[in-house]
Image (tube, rainbow, N blue to C red):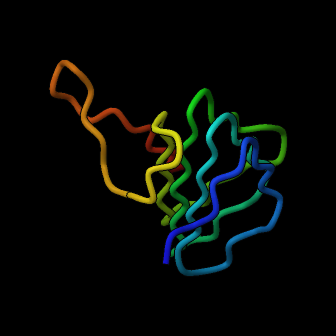
C-alpha cells in the first residue's frame, strides 16, 4: 500500500533488519542506525540529510535520492546515465 506523503520526516528509529522506506515532499533528516542486513531507502523532494548518529553498518544498504513522494523505491538514474544514489556502506 502507498506510504503517506508528508512535508518533512525525521527518522530516529533504528533498523535491525528488513527494509525501511521513507518519503517526504520536502525533507528527510535521519539519525538512525541501519544494522547489517538492513536496507534503508529514503527519498524527498528537496533534501535527505544524514545527521549526527546516522550509521549504515557494514552489510547494510542505504539509498537516498531527490524524488519527492513517488511511492517507488527503486534506483534512479541521473541525466548523465549514471546511478544517482548515495550508497552509504561502511
Q: Is residue 86 above or below residue 62?
A: above
Looking at the image, residue 55 sits to the left or right of residue 59; the answer is right
> How many numbered marks does the figure carry?
0
Q: Residue at x 77, y 55 (%)?
A: 11
**Identity of the residue drawn at 51% across and 53% down:** 62
Give the residue furthest to the top: 80
Residue 50, x across and y down, in percent:
70, 38
- Residue 56's place in the image compared with 45, above or below, is below
* Left or right, residue 3 beside residue 77: right
Residue 1 vs residue 75: left or right?
A: right
Residue at the location (60% across, 27% down)?
46
Q: Position of residue 37 (x, y in %)?
A: 50, 75
Residue 55 location, x and y as percent?
69, 52
Q: Is residue 16 above or below residue 41?
A: below
Q: Quadrant of residue 45?
A: top right
| Viewer-nearest residue: 51 or 4 | 4
- Image-quadrant location for residue 72: bottom left
Look at 56% across and 64% down and name the residue there: 21
Tell me where residue 38 appears, x and y as whole percent. Answer: 54, 72
Residue 44 in which image quadrant: top right
Q: Indicate left or right for 24 with 68 as reference.
A: right
Q: Is residue 54 above or below residue 18?
A: above
Q: Nearer the viewer, residue 29 or 17?
A: 29
Amino acid at each position: 500500500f502507498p506510504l503517506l506523503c508528508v512535508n518533512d520526516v525525521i527518522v530516529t528509529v533504528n533498523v535491525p533488519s528488513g527494509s525501511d522506506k521513507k518519503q517526504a515532499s520536502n525533507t528527510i533528516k535521519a539519525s538512525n542506525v541501519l544494522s547489517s542486513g538492513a536496507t534503508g531507502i529514503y527519498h524527498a523532494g528537496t533534501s535527505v540529510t544524514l545527521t549526527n548518529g546516522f550509521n549504515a553498518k557494514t552489510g547494510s544498504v542505504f539509498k537516498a535520492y531527490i524524488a519527492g513522494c513517488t511511492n517507488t523505491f527503486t534506483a534512479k538514474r541521473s541525466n548523465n546515465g549514471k546511478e544517482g544514489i548515495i550508497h552509504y556502506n561502511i
